[in-house]
């Protein structure tokens, strides 16, 4: 891979990481901590929504983000022909 392609590859990779970390931050800190009191007015399965985000929702979102990252990186690896055989 040439130097320019390598820079583009890592720029896209870091962009993916930044976006996924921002989503994780939003769900776990903003929804789970800062907006918990506001979200507690809504209930999911008998549990308050703010509590649900703090205890379970952020974990579910984190696991989904892992799979999204794997998908995006496989797609990026194929695009730049650095995929594993």
Image (cartoon, rainbow, N blue to C red):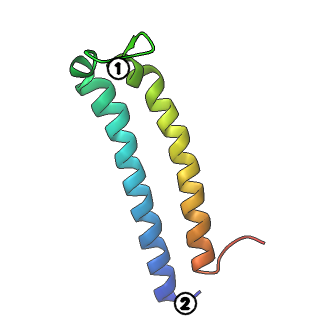
Residue 49: which disc? 1
Q: Position of residue 77 (x, y in %)?
A: 61, 72
- Give the answer, above or below, for where 4 lies relative to 34: below
Q: Position of residue 26 (x, y in %)?
A: 32, 39
In the picture provided, is 59 more to the left or to the right than 77?
A: left
In the picture provided, is 1 more to the left or to the right than 56?
A: right
Label 1: state its secondary structure: helix
Residue 79: which disc? none
- Give the answer, above or below, for where 38 lies relative to 64: above
User: Counting other residues with Cα less than 10 Å from the Cα at mark 1, is it few (<14), some (14-19), or many (20 or more)?
Assistant: many
Depth check: give the residue in front, 82 or 35. Answer: 35
Mark 2 vs mark 1, foreground winner is: 1
Label 2: state its secondary structure: loop
Which of the two labelled residues, at mark 2 and mark 1, occupies the earlier sequence position? 2
Q: Could you say which quadrant of the image residue 81 lies in?
A: bottom right
Q: Position of residue 50 (x, y in %)?
A: 32, 20
- Give the answer, above or below, for where 78 lies relative to 20: below
Residue under the image location 44 percent in, 20 percent down: 55
In the picture provided, is 83 more to the left or to the right than 71?
A: right
Residue under the image location 48 percent in, 23 percent down: 56
User: Counting other residues with Cα less than 10 Å from the Cα at mark 2, is it few (<14), some (14-19), or many (20 or more)?
Assistant: few
Depth check: give the residue in front, 19 or 47. Answer: 47
Q: Which residue is mark 2?
A: 2
Q: Position of residue 22 (x, y in %)?
A: 34, 48
Determine the residue located farthest toward the right in the rendered image.
Answer: 85
């Amino acid at each position: 891979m040439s130097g320019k392609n390598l820079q583009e590859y890592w720029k896209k990779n870091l962009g993916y990481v930044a976006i996924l970390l921002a989503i994780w931050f939003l769900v776990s800190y903003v929804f789970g901590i800062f907006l918990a009191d506001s979200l507690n007015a809504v209930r999911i399965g008998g549990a308050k929504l703010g509590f649900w985000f703090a205890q379970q929702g952020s974990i579910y979102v984190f696991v989904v983000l892992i799979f999204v990252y794997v998908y995006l990186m496989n797609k990026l690896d194929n695009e730049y022909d650095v995929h594993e055989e």
